[in-house]
Amino acid sequence: MAIIETFGLTKQFNGLVAVDEMTLAIDREIFGLLGPNGSGKTTTVRMLTTLLTPTSGEAKVCGHSVTASPREVRDRISYVPQDMAVDMKLTGRENVVFFANLYGIPRPRETADEALAQMDLASRADDMVNTYSGGMRRRLELAQALVHDPEVLFLDEPTIGLDVAGRRKIWEHIINLKNGGMTVFVTTHYMDEADHACDRVGIIDKGKIVALDTPTALKSLHCHEIIAIRGEGEYKGTVVPDVTFIGKTDDELRFQAISGEDSGIPLLRALTNSGMKIHSFVIRQPTLDDVFLSLIGEQEETMAFDHHRFRTMLRRRA
Amino acid sequence: MKRTFTYMERDLRRWIRGRINVITSLVMPAAWLIFVGLALPIRFTDNYLDFITPGILVLTMLGASLQGGALLMFDKILGFLQKFLAMPAPRESILFGKILAITLRGLIQTTVILVIALILGAHLLDPIFLLQTYLILFIFGVLLSSIMTTVALSLDDHDSYAAFNSMVAMPLFFTSSALMPYDQMPGWLAFLAHLNPVSYAIDAIRALQGGIFPATTIAGLLVSAVIVLSICIMTFRRATV
Ligand SMILES: Nc1ncnc2c1ncn2[C@@H]1O[C@H](COP(=O)(O)OP(=O)(O)OP(=O)(O)O)[C@@H](O)[C@H]1O
Ligand SMILES: [Mg+2]
């Protein structure tokens, strides 16, 4: 039996299909759900954490149905939502002890201290949370989630809005938790992070899973070698044999080729002939980002950021 | 039950930490007591302070409850509620904790107002009277905070909650029996005042001042509180699936 199973899981909002016939089986692993804004990641997590009722289909967590026995599911999971929510006017320790009491842990203070230490927050435990950095607040949320030693941890965009060091630290903790036997279901926008940390990833677009495998398998399956080209002028769809166009990012065109070395020069020549002016080109191994681009197309990164900024603004007002 | 207290403790802790709010919410009722209770030239009684104090106590509770609904509104829009709902603790304890925290907060504030009234010379220092007054204020607090929590659950954002709040606050106070007895009011006002739940709480405390135990009024408040609380629980269940 898999730890998380879904069968044709579907959620509609007034006719809009947010999650479409999703069927998954997730074992003890870090499973990454990747997708652009509005693709249905949060909706999926909210169904699995018993916060939303599916329109149709079924989901089981640790063998318990999210609709028929939600209490059993909640006993075994922790959920850290996308928006950071910790009490600013309480200390780090107070925040975690509060959760320990809600979970009904026998020794709330000691357990909270252990969780804080595990998240490297012991030295700041008695400071008010409004003096914490963004990364520390996220780790505090993880400490809150860990006090009742859940079997499954759901993290929705755990690294959004953090700097590079902050992100790396969060992922280190996530990997440690998995090594300790926990199942981690995580959603993210950041392909490179998923590439390094996730055992398996599912790519979701408009509510549908369009690819599901280990990062390595996905890369070798969908792309061979990548030719990334920077230049001026409009791309008119020119290709040469053994090369396919996978997409366009802000400043570059990306192609995949069976051999970049063989196809690079012919491709450049063809592009120049079509009227483009080429500034530079690189041949490299594919990344998850390339797989994502070839499956889904250009990602609107800016939207996610504004979303986050808006929530931060709201929080300051409160 | 234990979880209810855990949720309540969180809200009270956060309230006490926001030191300024603790003071500012007391300024209005204290000002009413001092400037209106002491200074207004009134003919229908020689001790207006004694007359107006029950009104101000209920006003304080009213203010606490109106502000209190915002607590759940913020938990909702900031994502706290999401976290709480995914936990195994009984979901209703979120609601009970809120209502209890708002009511307790109101009782602490009314205590301060009560002390100010005593210092100003109001005649209230009878333990049985005080005990019964607290009982009435408690029931009234549960009634109003359940109403406001239901409103917060039904609205989507804090701005509409604030709008609702300012729309009802003043009318509720001025159309009550807080400032004058029914026989001194114009007919239309007396009519409105008889419909206003705020009047019932005030009249009950005034009855206590006159040495009568207002059993029917208290029972009425209690029944209303239970009804509204049930509506609140139903709204909460519907809002959270
Ligand atoms: N409560 C709701 N009512 C109506 N539509 C909703 C609701 N929640 C989500 N949606 C819609 O469902 C779709 C999927 O949203 P969801 O929040 O799951 O996306 P996401 O992948 O988490 O996006 P993001 O990366 O921006 O967080 C979107 O089109 C969204 O507008
Ligand atoms: Mg999301």
Image (cartoon, rainbow, N blue to C red):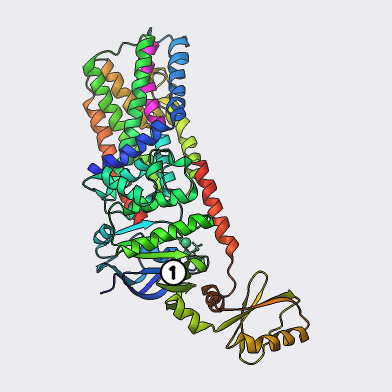
Image position of A181 with respect to A218: above or below: above
Residue A107 occupies quadrant: top left
Q: In which quarter of the image is the N terminus of chain A?
A: bottom left
Is residue B205 within the magenta segment? no
Residue shown at the point (47%, 64%) measured from the top left = A188
Q: What element carries label 1?
A: strand
Residue shown at the point (71%, 75%) measured from the top left = A280
Which span of residues is magenta-colored? B47-64
Image position of A257 with respect to B108: above or below: below
Q: Does the residue labelled 1 lie within 8 Å of ligand 1?
A: no
Residue B133 occupies quadrant: top left
Residue A46 seen by the camera: no
The picture places residue B72, in percent across and down from the top left corner, at: 39, 44
The picture places residue A218, in percent across and down from the top left corner, at: 47, 79
Image position of B112 with respect to A173: above or below: above
Residue shown at the point (39%, 12%) measured from the top left = B48
The chain carrying label 1 is A
Magenta stretch mostly in which secondary structure? helix
Q: Which of B231 and A83 lies nearest the eye of the viewer? A: A83
Is residue B63 within the magenta segment? yes
The picture places residue B8, in percent across and down from the top left corner, at: 31, 38
Q: How many marks?
A: 1
Residue B169 seen by the camera: yes
Q: What residue type is labelled 1?
A: Leu
Residue shown at the point (22%, 21%) measured from the top left = B213
Image position of A247 with respect to B94: above or below: below
Q: How crowded is mark 1: few (under 14 residues within 10 Å), some or many (20 or more)?
A: many
Q: Which of B70 and B89 lies nearest the eye of the viewer? A: B89
Q: In this view, does B150 lie to the left or right of A288?
A: left
The residue carrying mark 1 is: A33
